[in-house]
Image (cartoon, helix red, strand yellow):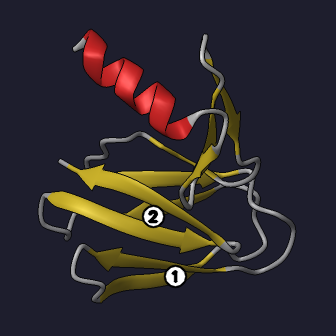
């Protein structure tokens, strides 16, 4: 396990590792995590209702897609900074949500 960490450290150096949600920096001693500010969702995993908060002002389209990229559900924020989305009709699994230009992942129980 320790050898894998050293290998990754040597491989990455101080280069940023990026994805759609977060940016990590390998520094050799510890990591620094810079979260993208903006839309947050909870609870995750979710049961019947999912909440999006910190939406910018304005009416935003909210789209939920499954792992295959198929659009499952669309709604809008109706100008509210916090929006609830009823997801009880979704099957259990991993889904992606796009809102206000941000892409987030959630699990439906």
Residue in the picture at 42% in, 39% down: 43
Within 10 Å of the Cα at label 1, are there few (<14), some (14-19), or many (20+) other Cα atoms?
few
Residue in the picture at 59% in, 33% down: 13
- 43 vs 84, left or right, is left
Alpha carbons under labels 1 and 2: distance apart:
8 Å
- Judged from the image, the secondary structure of the residue bearing numbered disc 1 is strand
Is residue 5 visible from the viewing direction of this image? yes
- Label located before the other in sequence (1 or 2): 1
- Give the residue at mark 2: 85
Tell me: residue 17, above or below residue 80: above
Percent across and percent down for residue 77 are: 66, 73
Percent across and percent down for residue 34 are: 71, 36
Percent across and percent down for residue 86 are: 37, 64
In the foreground, 13 or 65: 13
| Pointers 1 and 2 in contact (C-beta within 8 Å) | yes
In the foreground, 17 or 6: 6
Tell me: residue 22, above or below residue 26: below
- Give the residue at mark 1: 75
- 25 vs 109, left or right, is right
In the foreground, 25 or 64: 25
Residue at the limit of the structure toward the right, as seen here: 57
Q: Quadrant of the N terminus?
A: top left
Residue in the picture at 19% in, 70% down: 89
Using the rendered view, name the quadrant where residue 100 is placed: bottom right
Within 10 Å of the Cα at label 2, are there few (<14), some (14-19), or many (20+) other Cα atoms?
some
Percent across and percent down for residue 28 are: 60, 18
Tell me: residue 4, above or below residue 69: above
């Amino acid at each position: 396990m320790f050898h894998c960490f050293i290998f990754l450290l040597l491989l990455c150096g101080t280069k940023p590792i990026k994805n759609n949600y977060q940016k990590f920096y390998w520094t050799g001693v510890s990591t620094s995590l810079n979260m993208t500010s903006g839309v947050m969702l909870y609870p995750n995993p979710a049961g019947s209702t999912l909440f999006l908060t910190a939406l910018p002002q304005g009416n935003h389209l909210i789209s939920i897609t499954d792992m295959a990229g198929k659009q499952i559900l669309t709604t809008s924020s109706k100008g509210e900074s916090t929006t609830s989305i009823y997801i009880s009709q979704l099957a259990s699994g991993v889904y992606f949500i796009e809102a206000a230009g941000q892409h987030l992942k959630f699990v439906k129980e």
